[in-house]
Amino acid sequence: MTKILVVSGHTDLQKNSFANKIILDRLSEIMPEAEYVYLDTEYPGWTFNVEREQERLKSADVIVMQFPFFWYGVPSIMHKWMEEVFVHGFSHGSKGKALVGKKLLVSFTSGAPEEMYQTGGVQGYPVDDFLTPLKQFARACGMEWTGYVYSGGLSYASRHDDEKLRQMKEKALLHAERVAEKVRSL
């Protein structure tokens, strides 16, 4: 059986998330066999149990990184987790082979609608262009980059508009279904 690890990199999932919370709640319903790590609640002081996190990663076959797209990349807590857990000798370097062959799927949301992420659009580039660091991260660790699931237009700022909330909820639920479908296909 494939072991799935889902890591939530939202900095404050319970109080300041709409879409990522819905996505993770739905994923836990449709993929109850997966292990879920919520960095913000498990490590509120951002002091990681590196050995535990490395063991989780080593035991997983598929690693899903779920996060909101903050300033064109992963949120600060997830970035710090990456810096402290994926260290030379563990995940990369001549002796860092612990993650070789593991599959990495990136799942993320943005407040900006998808159409803003295109050449000449408001964001200037397609969303795929912003993922080069994550693709290289997977490559450096010997992981297989399996792509991403992305949904835009999921702005927490719209949480007070009932119609937008309804639309965002539907979109977030669909996003979770797409993640589960992608994981099952690996």
Image (tube, rainbow, N blue to C red):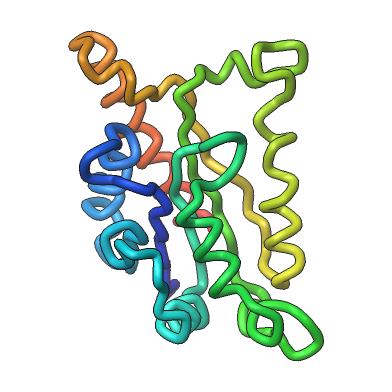
The residue positioned farthest toward the front in the image shown: 45
Report the quarter where the N terminus lies: bottom left
Please give left or right for residue 163 compared with residue 89 in the image.
Answer: left
Relative to 139, 45 lies left or right: left
Residue extending furthest right? 94
Q: Is residue 98 above or below residue 136?
A: below
Expressed as whole percent of the image width and height from the top left, the position of residue 75 reads 49, 47
Q: Give the left or right position of residue 40, taking residue 116 as reference.
A: left
Please provide percent x and percent y for residue 155.
38, 23
Mark yes or no: residue 27 visible: yes
Specify whether residue 36 is in view.
no
Image quadrant for the C terminus? bottom right
Report the label total.
0
- Give x and y (percent) for residue 68: 45, 39
Q: Is residue 91 above or below residue 8?
A: below
Q: Nearer the viewer, residue 126 or 145?
A: 126
Residue at point 67%, 52% (across, down): 134
Query: In terms of depth relative to the viewer, which is nearer, 120 or 11?
Result: 11
Residue at image point 41% right, 74% down: 48
